[in-house]
Image (cartoon, rainbow, N blue to C red):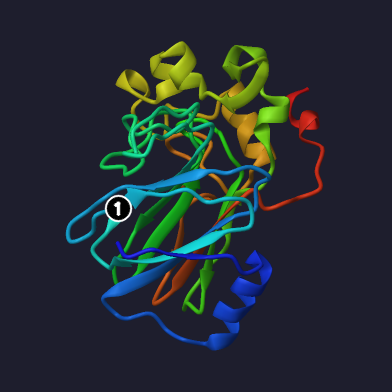
């Protein structure tokens, strides 16, 4: 991965990408990661064949651009509350991938995930199956096909039930999944519940889905949560704003 940090306005950056009309190489996709949050975040990217993945810091308003080969299948997520030293070692409050800035594996839950399988026809989604730590959206740019926006742009931390909340210094920093908290077959879609007929939405996954209709809320939430697009670039944005009162979804 050869990243490049850009401090252009995120909106201006997206407009430049869209208006350029440039198509990505048939063998690669261009990813633009944007931090619209009010605080620094540390996105992580899982590695793959011929792709190192990694991790980096983004201050508020910053963006980074990198390319991934069409063979890549992996995840992008944001880490919060990190404290890395000069060697790139250190902990994060959420999304940690082994106390290192450069990720070589997926981050620990809870974390909001952008997931990709790149091929002639790309598959992509935003998943809350591992919980929630940041609003995140995936926008295909200059692609062909359905190419819908996937994401969860509301902040579930503000309305997370106490039994799912992860707190640091008295503040909710993430919302765990019911599977992570209760570890039952019903919540985790395993054992006798390991198929889409038996494993149905639960109280918690229904609330996640109501707040974030285009994101995965549980393992078999495929029909409204997975999207396809061909020959596209991607913009992955954190903390895209939406005016909605999320507390209504929990009561």
What is the tally of numbered marks visible in this picture? 1
Please identify the quadrant where the N terminus is shown: bottom left
| Residue 88 position by quadrant | top left
Residue shown at 58%/58% (left/top)?
Answer: 62
**Residue 236 percent location from the top left of the image:** 52, 58
160 relative position to 191: left or right: right
* Secondary structure found at label 1: loop
Q: Please give the name of the residue rendered at 54% of the width and 50% of the height, measured from the top-left corner.
A: 224
- Give the image quarter of residue 150: bottom right
Q: Is residue 76 above or below residue 51?
A: above
Q: 27 or 47, which lies in front?
A: 47
**Residue for point 35% across, 69% down:** 121
In the image, is 18 to the left or to the right of 83? right
Q: Is residue 47 above or below residue 156?
A: below
Question: Residue 26's spot in the image, x, y percent?
Answer: 29, 80
Judge whether 43 appears above or below 220 on screen: below
Residue 189 percent across, percent down from the top left: 39, 26
Determine the image quadrant of residue 122. Answer: bottom left
Estimate how packed mark 1 is, as few (under 14), some (14 to 19) or many (20 or more) residues with alpha carbons within 10 Å.
many
Most extreme residue toward the front is: 86
- Judge by depth and name the residue closer to the eye, 222 or 26: 26
- Position of the C terminus, as image quadrant, is top right
In the rendered structure, the answer to whether residue 161 lies left or right of residue 246 reads left
Whole-percent x and y of residue 102?
Answer: 32, 44
The residue that label 1 is drawn on is 53
Q: Nearer the viewer, residue 243 or 179?
A: 243
At horizontal 51% and vertical 24% (from top left) the residue drawn is: 177
């Amino acid at each position: 991965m050869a990243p490049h940090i850009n401090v252009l306005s995120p909106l201006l950056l997206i407009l430049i990408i869209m208006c350029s009309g440039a198509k990505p190489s048939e063998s690669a996709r261009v990813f633009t990661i944007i931090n619209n949050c009010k605080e620094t975040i540390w996105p992580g990217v899982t590695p793959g064949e011929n792709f190192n993945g990694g991790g980096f810091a983004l201050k508020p308003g910053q963006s980074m651009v990198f390319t991934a080969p069409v063979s890549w299948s992996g995840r992008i997520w944001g880490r919060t509350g990190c404290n890395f030293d000069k060697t790139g070692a250190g902990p994060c409050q959420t999304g940690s991938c082994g106390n290192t800035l450069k990720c070589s594996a997926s981050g620990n839950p809870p974390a909001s995930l952008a997931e990709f399988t790149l091929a002639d026809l790309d598959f992509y989604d935003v998943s809350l199956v591992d919980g929630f730590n940041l609003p995140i959206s995936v926008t295909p740019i200059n692609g062909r096909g359905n190419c819908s926006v996937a994401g969860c742009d509301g902040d579930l931390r503000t309305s997370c039930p106490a039994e799912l909340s992860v707190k640091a210094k008295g503040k909710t920093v993430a919302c765990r999944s019911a599977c992570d908290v209760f570890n039952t077959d019903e919540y985790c879609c395993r054992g006798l519940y390991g198929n889409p007929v038996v494993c149905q939405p639960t109280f918690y996954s229904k609330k996640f889905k109501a707040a974030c209709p285009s994101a995965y809320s549980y393992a078999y939430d495929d029909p409204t949560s997975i999207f396809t697009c061909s020959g596209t670039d991607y913009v992955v944005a954190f903390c895209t704003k939406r005016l909605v009162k999320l507390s209504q979804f929990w009561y």
